[in-house]
Image: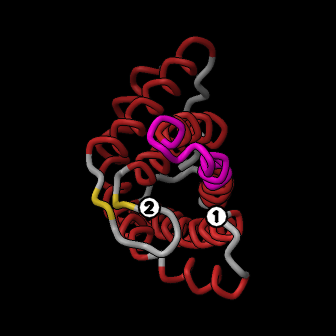
Amino acid sequence: MQVKYRIKGIRAITYTALFAAIIFIGISVLRIPIPALVGRPFVHFGNSLTVLAILILGGRLGAIAGAIGLGGFDLLNGYAATSWLTVLEVIIMALVVSGMVHFFHDNDRTGNVIIISVVAGITKVFTSYFSSLITALMYGTTFKAAVVASFLSLPATVINSISTVIIVPILYFAVKDIVYRSIR
């Protein structure tokens, strides 16, 4: 399951930019807003595509693609004040997913990809909770109110996490051979 081929040079830049663009488009094209007490969350495919980028490109390049795609979206769409939290979430996701990839060593079993997707979804729920908590505190909310409001703001994240569990294995097995063949 580890990245089979190290992407270097211009290919690394190209694939990272390609995934960043795909992530940006994935979050821009389909946005379903969900009412929340903290922030303006919405359902989108950006998180799923970020996990896919981490699986295909590896932790470092996948994190860069996710940070550019998700962070860039935030900067350009009214979320600039909290875009640093999005980038931090991407870095944490890259560390967790990369750790899971290394744990499963060198195998591409469907079950392992599903497990990684589930762990990625759970990680997203926790990072979004803490991101919402920090956002609420930045707005001047008391700590107790921020804890409750952050918890009540999780429905969009839970839906995004469930979609990650479904979408990542499907796209991973559809895309990985194409990407690895072009790298060889």
Q: Amino acid at mark 1?
A: Thr
The residue drawn where x is 47% and y is 35% is 76
Where residue 183 sits in the image (x, y, percent)?
47, 21
Q: Which residue is mark 1?
A: 135
Seen from the viewer's position, the closer of residues 138 and 174 is 138
For badge 2, the amino acid type reads Arg
Residue 3 occupies quadrant: top right
Q: Residue 45 magenta-drawn? A: no
Q: Nearer the viewer, residue 177 or 154?
A: 154
Q: Nearer the viewer, residue 125 or 54?
A: 125
Q: Residue at x 57, y 39 (%)?
A: 62
Left or right of residue 50: residue 62: right
- Other-residue count near label 2 (Cα within 10 Å), few / some / many at <14 / 14–19 / ≥20: few
Which residue position holds label 2? 40
Residue at the image position 70 percent from the left and 70 percent from the top: 140
* Coordinates of residue 7 in the picture (x, y in percent): 58, 24
- Which numbered disc, 1 or 2, marks the residue that appears first in the sequence? 2
Q: How is the image coloured?
A: secondary structure
How far apart, in angstroms, are the residues tagged by discs 1 and 2?
11 Å
**Secondary element at image label 1:** helix
Instruction: Read off the magenta span.
Output: 74-91
Q: How many marks?
A: 2
Q: Residues within 10 Å of mark 1 (few under 14, many from 20)?
A: some
Instruction: Tell me whether circle 1 and circle 2 mark residues in contact (CB < 8 Å).
Output: no
Q: Position of residue 35 (x, y in %)?
A: 36, 71
